[in-house]
Image (tube, rainbow, N blue to C red):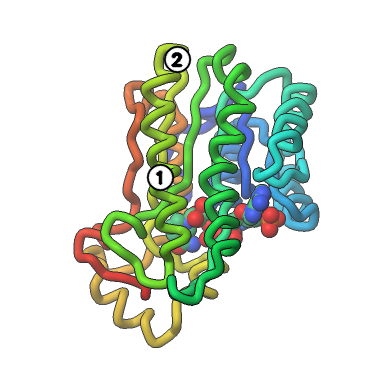
Amino acid sequence: MSENIFKDNILQGKVAFVTGGGTGITGGVARALAEAGAKLAITSRKIENLEAAAKIITDNGGECLPVVCDVRDYEAVEKAIAATVEKYGKIDIVVNGAAGNFLCKANELSTNGFGTVVDIDTKGTFNVCRAAFEELKKSRGQILNISATLHYLATPMQIHVSAAKAGVDAITRNLSVEWGRYGIRVNGIAPGPIEDTEGMKRLLLPELKDKLVKRIPVGRFGRIKDIENSALFLCSDAASYINGVTLVVDGGQWLLGTSLG
Ligand code: NAP
């Protein structure tokens, strides 16, 4: 895949607030937005994740504000949004990537475990959208929610994430309708299994990996770069009439019903 598919600086002048922007897929999305010219605020719980990611962005000539914030804590989210506006004057793009995950059979999963993932992925996504609304209304900005395909069919050992991401997709659709009138576009990306992530390394048992890749129509696992490119497209003016869509980026994997469990 070529390094630079898009025209230079397609997001020049934009400010992006990215949750879960210190690591993995959403870390890649944050870097890609910065390389396209956006100024960044990245947020998650661990300052070490954020500082390392912010350093890569600033070493590369970008601007990046690391803000510690647990998306489950609405007051902390409001403060993180306020810190971003104080530094950059506005917010144009919100990316919700913060998420929790682990493998667990439904009959062994504690109700707390289930609730924690829903709190981070679903409620956290709503918290951030809600806290950013006034800024996005001013900027006629947009939201990009990172979802998954786990809930399209059924994924054993992933009932908590499946339920949480189904909720995220509902948020994407509802807000696209309610907030479209303010010029705010709300979309999502549903990645398939992305191999260069810690999550995949942790979740995908090696013996399942070979079996699964043979059942992905395009013949390979996804890469963080695949999600970066889709995010850049959806955040750019090329997608200015796209609203309420969760773009599946999985090489056609879910259509074959291949499960990680
Ligand atoms: P990851 O690196 O573990 O990303 C999760 C991020 O969320 C981390 O940066 C983590 O940082 C942050 N986070 C966790 N709890 C938080 C909280 N309470 N408040 C704020 N931030 C929190 O995993 P990833 O695999 O790249 O996943 C990124 C996104 O893609 C997720 O939404 C995931 O569901 C989705 N996805 C991934 C795959 C895949 O194949 N990997 C497939 C489909 C969808 P801290 O620990 O510093 O808080």
**Above or below 232: residue 10:** above
**Above or below 141: residue 57:** below
Q: Give the quarter of the image for residue 58.
A: top right
Task: Read off the residue under disc 1.
Answer: 189
Residue, x 39% and y 26% (percent of image)? 176
Residue, x 35% and y 30% (percent of image)? 244
Comparing 207 with 154, the one in front is 154
N-terminal label among 1 and 2: 2
Comparing 128 with 97, the one in front is 128
Task: Read off the residue under disc 2.
Answer: 183
Q: Give the quarter of the image for residue 64.
A: top right
Residue kind at label 1, given as amino acid type:
Ile
Tell me if mark 1 has few (under 14), some (14-19) or many (20+) residues whose alpha carbon lies within 10 angstroms of its own: many
Give the position of the C terminus as an image quadrant.
Answer: bottom left
User: From the Cβ of disc 1, is ligand 1 less than 8 Å away?
Assistant: no
**Above or below 156: residue 180:** above
Badge number at residue 210: none
